[in-house]
Image (cartoon, rainbow, N blue to C red):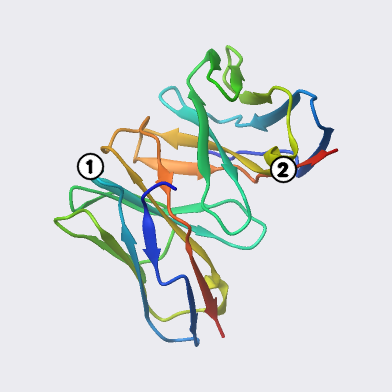
Amino acid sequence: LAKTTQPISMDSYEGQEVNITCSHNNIATNDYITWYQQFPSQGPRFIIQGYKTKVTNEVASLFIPADRKSSTLSLPRVSLSDTAVYYCLVARNTGNQFYFGTGTSLTVIP
Amino acid sequence: ETGVTQSPTHLIKTRGQQVTLRCSSQSGHNTVSWYQQALGQGPQFIFQYYREEENGRGNFPPRFSGLQFPNYSSELNVNALELDDSALYLCASSLSGTLTDTQYFGPGTRLTVL
């Protein structure tokens, strides 16, 4: 079982950078980490995925330290439309399992 | 829009009944995963189907079962419904059974068990 833990909620002002951390202390060697965004009454939407070090795409960056026991999603210059719940997901190769975190509700304030 | 559709949108059942939820995957995808999301919680993995075979299963009892059809659409069946089965049921399709494939989620089916 890959237990994943996140802060319950965060507030940020528009235009600021937001960092959301997920703890996954018992991550296994072949596990991958993915982050999703979810709006009310919708399914989660893919943001970014990584295995180690740093990954960047057009909307976010993902930082994974060498021990891989945590990961940090970084959203640059958030806007009001970034208000949502953010989940980390650990995908486990052994037995093909998927473990979502507890979710972080981000509120962006004008 | 992900191209993943689910039906019905909402459903109300009583305890002990059986329910079937349906999912149409995105074009070209051969893998479907099902999740249960209780109110205020993260999605919990139920199982995954790859090319019509179960490819992984989470910690759910056998009364949760599934099917995947030759066109890669899928069904989730839940027997002997319990009050705690009330949740949003999400399906997600992906290109193949590879662990790193992006999962594209549908909007979900909201099941209420009375």
Q: Is residue A89 visible?
A: yes
Q: Counting other residues with Cα less than 10 Å from the Cα at mark 1, is it few (<14), some (14-19), or many (20 or more)? A: few
Other-residue count near label 2 (Cα within 10 Å), few / some / many at <14 / 14–19 / ≥20: some
Question: Which amino acid lies under the numbered mark 2 shown in the image of this protein?
Answer: Thr
Mark 1, residue position: B28
Quadrant containing the C terminus of chain B is: bottom right
In space, the residues marked 2 and 1 are separated at their CA atoms by 32 Å
Q: In the rendered image, which quarter is residue A3 located in?
A: top right
* Element type where label 2 sits in the image: loop
Badge 2 and badge 1 both on one subunit: no
The residue nearer to you, when weighing B22 against A72, is B22
Residue A1 in view in this figure: no
Q: Position of residue B54 (x, y in %)?
A: 25, 52
Q: Nearer the viewer, residue A74 or B97?
A: A74
Towards the viewer: B64 or B101 = B101
Q: From the image, tell me which residue sits under label 2.
A: A83
Q: Residue furthest left?
A: B70
